[in-house]
Amino acid sequence: MGILSIGGLATGLDTNTIVDQLVALERRRAVGSLQTQKLEAEAHEIALQSFNTRILTLLTAVDKLRDANDVLARKATSSNTDLITASAANGAAPGATSITVTAVAQGAIATSATGTASADDTVASGSGSFAFQVGSGAVESVALDTSTTLQGLATSINELNAGVTATVINIGTESTPDHRLHLATTGTGLSNNLTIITDDTTLGVAVTQGAANASFTISGFAAPLSRETNSFDDVLPGVTLNLLGTGGPTAVTVTTDADATAALVDDVVKAYNDLITFVAAESAVEQVTDSEDRDVNAGPLAFDRTVDSILDSLRANVSDSVSGLPGVYSILAQLGVDTQQDGTLAFDQAEFKEALASDETALSQLLGGAVGVDGVADRLHDYLSGITQAGGLIEISTDTLSDRITSLEDRILSGERNLDQFEDSLRASFVSLEVLVSSLKTQGAFLESFFGANQNANGNNR
């Protein structure tokens, strides 16, 4: 509870303003510096978190180059895209393969022999069922009665989610409609064959197309190969084939995709440069001079030794040579990746592609390593993982900042409590002063009255 202020009634002083100003001065002295330190620590913490985010982005890009096989992006082309299309994953073996397609995979189809004038016409003369089976799966059944319509039957079949799509198709015309039931398995291949078990409708549903596997031959193998689908990736390692039609032979060629390979390295360079540029901006120090004061403004990471140490280690991991590799490349500069004066990396993609064309194996080994030898990406991964993991350098620095912020908050709260006591003490002192002055004024008035009365009395006695 605050001290009652009487606002200078006796002294004529503006005691409230005087107290407010004295408290403000004491606040600047007692907690002003602490609040500034807290703001600086919070800015430092935010900058360090952003630094960590950029480190993790760099790590993600680096990890795509850790395996020498993944370094070399591949692309697949087809000599006849009407029959076969193909795509290749990183690590696919380069070369050409000739493929002849003798059959494409297909699902089973069943249709009704009898139609109806409307999809809302009934299709059963009494109670019964319509049952079917896909491959060796469970027998699925729909109950029928005299109210079952053609569209209702199709809807009930679809609601079973049994691997069959039922559709009502008008094979007639608008003036002479002929609505038929069409059943098609959602999957292809022999395991998706369709069997009509029971048909108590008036439609006469029967299988009109049996399911079939894809069949094709590969150059060098006399026996045909078979797959249940037209899209598969287990014939040519790392290559997905899509069969579209029969015929051939069609040449499927896998080559190195220079643009995609360069893009993987470019992602690392961009992430690295973003990190370097961010730290430079957050570490800027400038002298501010005006007519009265001279001061220095420093970014939140300006004097962070942990960040400086991390960048020094990163530069070494990027620029140092890799010994023990069997190929001709041992440093990134040979691949067109050079360190610039400002610490960022310059990436000459034309030079990189020349190195790739000259010896792609040596290039992939420099980045992704060889047997018993870590490449540049392996080296960077190990370092970046170490500093970002639990208990790593960045977490230690962040925890230290958090502890400092908490300590400053506690000291600021303590200082504010002391300020409250200081203000109460000031107000109590001024209240005492007001009481004293009021008392003195009262005594002065009494004495003035007393001596005035005596003086008058003495004058009358004369």
Image: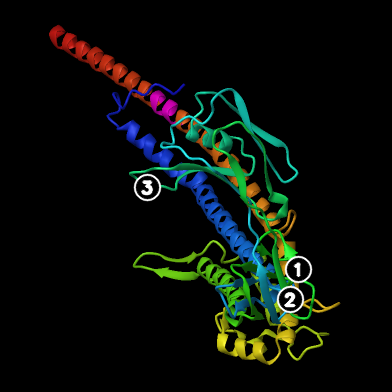
- Label 1 – label 3 distance at C-alpha: 43 Å
Element class at badge 1: strand
Give the mark, 1 or 2, whose residue is nearer the N terminus.
2
Label 3 residue SS: loop
Q: Amino acid at mark 1?
A: Leu
- Horizontal side, residue 178 vs residue 462: left or right: right
Residue indicated by mark 3:
173
Q: Is residue 382 visible?
A: no
SS at circle 2: strand
Q: Classify 10 Å Cα crowding around label 1: few (below 14), some (14-19), many (20 and above).
A: some
At x 36%, y 43%, the residue is 176
Q: Separation of disc 1 and disc 2 at Cα?
A: 8 Å
When asked about the image quadrant of residue 164, the answer is top right
- How many labels were placed on the picture? 3
Q: Is residue 274 above or below residue 394?
A: below
User: Answer yes or no: do the residues labelled 1 and 3 have beta carbons within 8 Å?
Assistant: no
**Is any part of residue 369 visible from this angle?**
yes
Rendering coords of residue 245 (x, y %): 59, 69
Between 90 and 138, the one nearer to me in the picture: 138
Binning the other alpha carbons within 10 Å of mark 2 as few (below 14), some (14 to 19) or many (20 upward) gives some
Which of the two residues, 177 or 182, is positioned nearer the viewer here? 177
The residue nearer to you, when weighing 123 against 106, is 123
Residue found 58% across the figure and 36% down from its top: 157
What distance separates the C-alpha of mark 2 from that of mark 3?
A: 46 Å
Q: Earlier in the sequence, mark 2 or mark 3?
A: 3
**Circle 2 residue:** 218
Q: Which residues are magenta?
A: 426-432
Three-letter amino acid code at the position of disc 3: Thr
Asked if residue 430 is among those painted magenta in the image, a careful observer would answer yes
